[in-house]
Structure formats: C-alpha cells, structure tokens
Image (spheres, rainbow, N blue to C red):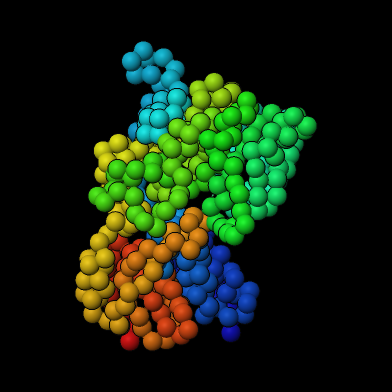
C-alpha cells in the first residue's frame, strides 16, 4: 500500500488549530518516520510548543520558566503617541510616559525603559565607563542566571573591572583604594538577589559609598519600588525583610539604580535605569540605547502598572494581588476544589529574588505524580511534585482558574 499523500494526511488532522504549513510539517515528519498514524501526535506536539497561557500551581510567584510576573494586557490596534507630543504636535520622547511615572514613584529625576535589567546594566556601564575602571566588591561579582554574570557584562560593555575587597568582607577603604590606586571612574553595587553570604561578613552600604566622589550605580535586580509598599493593604510583608527599595536606594545617595520590571515590580519584561538626569541623558544618547529601548506595547503595559502603583492599588497588579491574598481565602479556595488533602504550604518569591523567604500559603496534595497529566490540560497546569505526591499551591493560581484546576484534579483521581 502507498503511504498517504502529505496533503491528504495534513487535511486529516486539520481539526487541530494550526495553520496549514505546520500541519504539513507534521504530516511530513510522520511519513518520514514510516508511521503516518503519528501525524496527529506530531501536530499536537507542535501545538504545545507554541507560546501560550499556563496555570502556575507551583507556588513560585515569579517562576522564571513560566514568564516571571503574571501579567495581562491588551490595547487597541491604533497608532499611539509613542514619540509624539500631543501638546505641540512635534516629535516627543518615549521616556515621557512610563519612564516619567516610574521616576515619580521612586523620586528619581529621570528614568528610561530598556528591554530588561541586563540591558540596563550594560547600557549604564557602556555609557558611563567605557575604557574606564568600574569598582565592584568581590562579594557582588555574581551570576544571576541565564548567562548574566557581572564580570562578563562589565567586559562586554567595554569597561575594566576593578575587584574590591574579598568575597565575604568589603570595606569603604577598599573602594577608596580602588579609586586612588586603580583609577576607578565608577562604583557599581550589585544586589546579590539570588544567594546569601552569612557569617563573618561585611558590606559597604550605599550611604557609605556616597562619601567617595565618584558616580555610584546600583543594580537592584528585583525592582521593589518603595520599601513602604503603600500599594498593599498591610504594608510591607515580613518575607520582604531587607529587600532594598529603589526609592530608598536613591534617597541613600545612589546616582542611578537599575532594576527589572517583571520581578517584584510585577510588570512586563523590561528594565529601568533611574536617577540623576545628566547620567540618564548620557545613557539615552549612547548608540546602544537604540538597540535596547523598549517598544510601544511594553511601554504602554508598564505605564498601566505604574498607574496602578500611583493609585496604590496593589490588587490591580496580578503579582501583588497574589502576594496579599489572605491565607483564609487561600484555605477556603483549596477546600472548594473538593479534591485531595488540604495542607498549609510555603510559596516563594522566585525569580532569583529573596532566597529562603517563605510566603505562607495553602494548597492541596494528591497521592502520586500527576505532573504530566496536569501539563496536558488546556490550559496546562504546572504543579509541584515532591516524593510521589503532587502539590497544587493556591497562592499562584488566580481565583478565576479555580474551577479549571478543580475539574482537572477530579479527573486525576
Ligand atoms: C534578575 C537580575 C538581573 C537581570 O535582570 P533581567 O531583567 O532578567 O535582565 C540583573 N541583576 C540582578 C541583581 C538581578 O537580580
């Protein structure tokens, strides 16, 4: 018997929601493998490789592989005033909207938005320290993950790294010698977001560093805007502990701060550079700005997030809404799933932020490993599996998805 034609085979699976060329790819793969019957499987695998929504039941609020902060946004398909001044009818600037609002939120003179925090750090170093020395504590020469290593970013941006102090202790005097003996032109402080050094340690604070007459730039990473957390009903949660705020870091005397927008800020993927307007202007003028600047969709989404902060409306930001969901409510929601055993859990911030910080939560536990079955649901549900039990954490699930989760879990048992 002849194998079926590629076209006929592709047509036979056209109930799968994929464009014709991708169904044809699946049919070709199936025929090439000598198993035409597998066309549907290939097409379904292709379908599942596309980017789409999932339900994060892991209890990791900023799950790196699930897109960090959960965030939704839509806008009308119209032209925008991205770089257009509606008052004068002349050319405007893309830092006039989201950037300006973020600057206001943290008390900065100015702010610009780039693609992520890695771009923010790279641009700051390239604009302020190309061919110059940058002093960094040996305790802060960190790898954040996914190829972001501070020493490599420094060399990529054309600056010269001056290592200061030791891994566990760095004093003000170490920075002073970096300036005097090694000709440092810039001080860089990196918030080691994803690990802790404990024991015999000493760190030089932003405040101390301002006594040195050099620009001080701080890579905050996580993007907590303000330690006061006035957008939360009960203020700063205890698990945020010592997490430095962008506002407080500037108040302490940093000249620039850099941070991500999709970590503790709870917005879309972007990076912020904020602080002294002359330094921001130098960054804006640098040729890399053109390559790093954020697009209109992101700026628009970020503006919406900034407005929610200005309204002090944490519940309008999905990340903070999940953070401040009351424990009782999570427990009730877990019970209402009517499946598995309700248990107290610990959610975590994730995203390399606040290692070890536990956020009390509730969830349900099912005997056995149901991860693959739950991933096969539509939308896929991503659960945590621990010693042959499956745990569904309510903290990272939005309430609107509870019935979907409940139905999927009922089918597991
Ligand atoms: C996460 C992080 C980065 C990288 O941020 P992206 O937005 O992912 O580029 C840089 N520095 C620190 C300290 C971080 O925590």
Mark yes or no: residue 374 visible.
yes
The quadrant of the rendering that contains the C terminus is: bottom left
Mark yes or no: residue 292 visible.
no
Position of residue 40 measured from the top left corner of the image (x, y, whole percent) = 48, 74
Q: Quadrant of residue 288?
A: top right
Total labels: the figure holds 0
Residue 191 horizontal side relative to residue 47, left or right? right
Position of residue 150 measured from the top left corner of the image (x, y, whole percent) = 66, 46
| Residue positioned 24% across, 50% down in the render | 233
Position of residue 53 measured from the top left corner of the image (x, y, whole percent) = 39, 60
Position of residue 365 measured from the top left corner of the image (x, y, whole percent) = 35, 80
| Residue positioned 42% across, 83% down in the render | 389
In the foreground, 399 or 335 = 335
| Residue positioned 38% across, 44% down in the render | 227
Specify the farthest residue to the right.
181
In the foreground, 409 or 117 = 117
The quadrant of the rendering that contains the N terminus is: bottom right
Q: Quadrant of residue 165?
A: top right
| Residue positioned 53% across, 52% down in the render | 193
Residue 7 horizontal side relative to residue 174, left or right? left
* Rendered position, 213 above or below 148: above
Residue 145 horizontal side relative to residue 320, left or right? right
């Amino acid at each position: 018997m002849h194998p079926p034609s590629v076209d006929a085979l592709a047509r036979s699976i056209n109930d799968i929601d994929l464009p014709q060329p991708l169904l044809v790819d699946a049919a070709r793969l199936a025929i090439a493998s000598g198993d035409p019957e597998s066309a549907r499987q290939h097409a379904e695998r292709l379908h599942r490789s596309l980017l789409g929504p999932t339900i994060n039941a892991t209890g990791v609020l900023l799950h790196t592989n699930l897109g960090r902060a959960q965030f939704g946004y839509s806008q009308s398909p119209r032209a925008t005033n991205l770089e257009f001044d509606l008052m004068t009818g002349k050319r405007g600037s893309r830092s006039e909207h989201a950037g300006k609002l973020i600057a206001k939120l943290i008390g900065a003179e100015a702010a610009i938005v780039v693609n992520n925090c890695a771009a923010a750090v790279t641009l700051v170093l390239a604009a302020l320290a190309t061919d110059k020395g940058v002093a960094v504590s040996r305790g802060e020469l960190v790898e954040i993950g996914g190829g972001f290593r501070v020493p490599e970013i420094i060399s990529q941006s054309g600056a010269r790294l001056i290592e200061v102090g030791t891994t566990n202790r760095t004093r003000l005097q170490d920075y002073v010698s970096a300036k005097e003996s090694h000709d440092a032109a810039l001080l860089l402080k990196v918030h080691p977001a994803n690990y802790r050094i404990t024991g015999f340690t000493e760190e030089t604070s932003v405040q101390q560093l301002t006594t040195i007459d050099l620009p001080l730039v701080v890579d905050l990473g996580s993007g907590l805007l303000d330690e006061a957390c006035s957008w939360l009903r009960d203020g700063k949660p205890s698990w945020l502990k010592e997490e430095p705020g962008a506002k407080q870091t500037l108040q302490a005397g940093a000249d620039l701060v850099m941070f991500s927008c999709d970590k503790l800020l709870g917005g879309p993927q972007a990076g912020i550079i904020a602080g002294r307007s002359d330094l921001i202007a130098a960054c804006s003028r640098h040729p890399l700005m053109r390559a790093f600047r954020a697009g209109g969709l992101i700026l628009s989404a970020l503006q919406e997030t900034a407005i929610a902060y200005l309204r002090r409306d944490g519940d309008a930001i999905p990340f903070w809404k999940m953070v401040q969901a009351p424990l009782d409510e999570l427990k009730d929601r877990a019970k209402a799933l009517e499946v598995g055993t309700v248990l107290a859990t610990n959610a975590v911030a994730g995203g390399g932020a606040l290692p070890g910080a536990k956020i009390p939560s509730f969830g349900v536990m099912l005997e056995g490993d149901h991860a693959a079955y739950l991933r096969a649901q539509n939308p896929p549900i991503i659960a945590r599996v621990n010693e042959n039990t499956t745990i569904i954490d309510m903290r990272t699930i939005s309430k609107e998805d509870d019935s979907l989760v409940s139905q999927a879990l009922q089918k597991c048992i």
